[in-house]
Image (cartoon, rainbow, N blue to C red):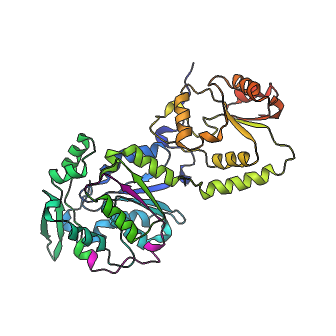
């Protein structure tokens, strides 16, 4: 049988301008490279992803000696956010010291930030100077905590620069304790000097309530973190309460390496408005669909859906089980509308990879909505089996599919298609 063309190359689908945009911000001594696994998973799921190198980090051409302030260090992120087109709002994700970088961007551009996610990250408040949480960690830790981290004062040509910091192999090993050894090797190869910028962050006013404080925040706790302990993470949450707290039980300080799929799933759930709640977009679609259904005196007894290019914009055989797909924007709201009206829904898909399809339905949290599952053969056989199991006549069924040949075949059975 001829294999169908994979229409979503690299997870990029038509209408990409409407995809949710997420900006991933790395921690100290690291670069955008640290996000490569999660970036790949998010893009494969259809999200727009930007992962900038902060100044003098990753492949950024600036030298650490060129930096004077924390704003200098954050400038690449600030430039990205400032360049967003009017009306576009992004989700910022900060890891470790990257929490301070996204906090600065939130304070500068609150109207451009839909939400911020702190992943085992330093999270300031709106009462104390930005350095407050960093100072507290420094007070609690002795120099033995830092192991072979190298601290030194980098002096610029015109004025004194920030205190430099470069993680050594032993300290990196602590941060990467549950991560694959090849990722630790990568970090040892690519790490560059950075700083906590304590002097600069301690000399500026607190982030404002109207800026930083106005943006919705989520915190992702990494329970096995030996760099920023779980206790310290939860103290920061208590110090500055957030809208939602998630936990990665098996993640060390580098969840993008130790638990990349779990971190991706967490971010994807948050972006889709899940975690026990449907997004506002789904609710609006549902209400609109309910109004439309209310115009009809008689509704179908059963609605049968195809999956590929009907529920989601791809073929299952072109995807890995590891990713979470994006439904078409109106799909879930319409499903909920039918369920609220008491109409059963079923799946009829001849996908050659039914195991992947079932996994995706589970990951999307919508498997329970389908009360009837038929065999993964031709749609006409699906409908016959569904009819035998339910007793619902073909004339009381409604069928959705993207392929004309299936629509024509099902219509001949008396099913509205």
Q: Where residue 190 appears, x then y in whole percent? A: 21, 50
Q: Quadrant of the C terminus?
A: top right
In the displayed image of the protein, which residue is found farthest to the top?
A: 1
Q: Is residue 362 left or right of residue 211?
A: right
Which of the pair 219/167 is nearer the observer? 219
The answer to which image quadrant residue 69 occupies is bottom left
Asked if residue 6 can be seen in this view, the reply is no
Q: Measuring 57% from the left and 38% from the top, which residue is drawn there? A: 361
Query: Is residue 208 in the magenta section?
Result: yes
What x and y, as percent, mark residue 374?
A: 66, 27
| Residue sitting nearer the eye, 375 or 100 | 375
Residue 117 position within the rendered picture, expressed as x and y whole percent measured from the top left: 42, 60
Which span is picked out in magenta? 201-226
From the viewer's perspective, is 307 left or right of 303?
left
Q: Position of residue 25 (x, y in %)?
A: 35, 58
Q: Is residue 406 above or below residue 112?
A: above
């Amino acid at each position: 049988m001829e294999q169908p063309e994979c229409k979503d190359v690299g997870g990029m689908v038509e209408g990409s301008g409407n995809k949710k945009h997420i900006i991933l911000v790395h921690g100290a001594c690291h670069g955008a490279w640290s996000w490569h696994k999660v970036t790949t998973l998010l893009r494969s799921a259809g999200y727009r992803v930007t992962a900038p190198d902060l100044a003098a980090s990753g492949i950024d051409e600036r030298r650490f000696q060129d930096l004077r302030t924390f704003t200098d260090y954050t400038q690449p992120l600030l430039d990205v956010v400032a360049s967003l087109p009017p009306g576009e709002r992004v989700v910022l994700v900060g890891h470790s010291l990257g929490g301070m970088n996204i906090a600065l961007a939130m304070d500068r551009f609150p109207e451009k930030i839909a939400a911020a996610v702190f992943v085992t990250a330093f999270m300031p408040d709106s009462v104390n100077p930005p350095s407050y949480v960093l100072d507290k960690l420094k007070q609690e830790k002795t120099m033995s905590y830092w192991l072979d981290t190298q601290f030194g004062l980098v002096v610029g040509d015109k004025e004194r620069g920030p205190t430099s910091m470069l993680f050594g192999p032993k300290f990196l090993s602590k941060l990467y304790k549950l991560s694959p050894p090849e990722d630790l090797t990568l970090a040892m190869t690519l790490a560059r000097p950075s700083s906590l910028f304590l002097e600069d962050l301690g000399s500026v006013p607190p982030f404002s309530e109207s800026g930083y404080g106005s943006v919705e925040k989520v915190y992702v706790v990494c329970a096995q973190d030996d760099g920023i302990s779980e206790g310290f993470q939860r103290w920061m949450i208590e110090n500055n309460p957030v809208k939602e707290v998630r936990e990665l039980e098996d993640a060390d300080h580098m969840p993008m390496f130790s638990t990349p799929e779990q971190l991706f799933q967490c971010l994807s759930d948050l972006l889709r408005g899940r975690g026990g709640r449907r997004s506002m977009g789904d609710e609006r679609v549902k209400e609109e669909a309910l109004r439309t259904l209310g115009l009809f005196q008689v509704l179908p007894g059963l609605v049968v859906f195809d999956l590929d290019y009907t529920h989601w914009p791809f073929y299952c055989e072109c995807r890995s089980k590891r990713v979470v797909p994006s439904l078409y924007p109106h799909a879930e709201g319409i499903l909920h509308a039918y369920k609220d009206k008491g109409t059963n829904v079923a799946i009829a898909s001849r996908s050659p990879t039914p195991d992947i399809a079932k996994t995706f339905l589970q990951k999307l949290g919508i498997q329970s909505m389908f009360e009837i599952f038929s065999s993964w053969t031709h749609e006409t056989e699906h409908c016959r089996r569904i009819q035998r199991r339910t007793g619902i006549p073909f004339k009381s069924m409604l069928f959705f599919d993207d392929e004309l040949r299936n629509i024509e075949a099902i219509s001949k059975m008396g099913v509205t298609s």
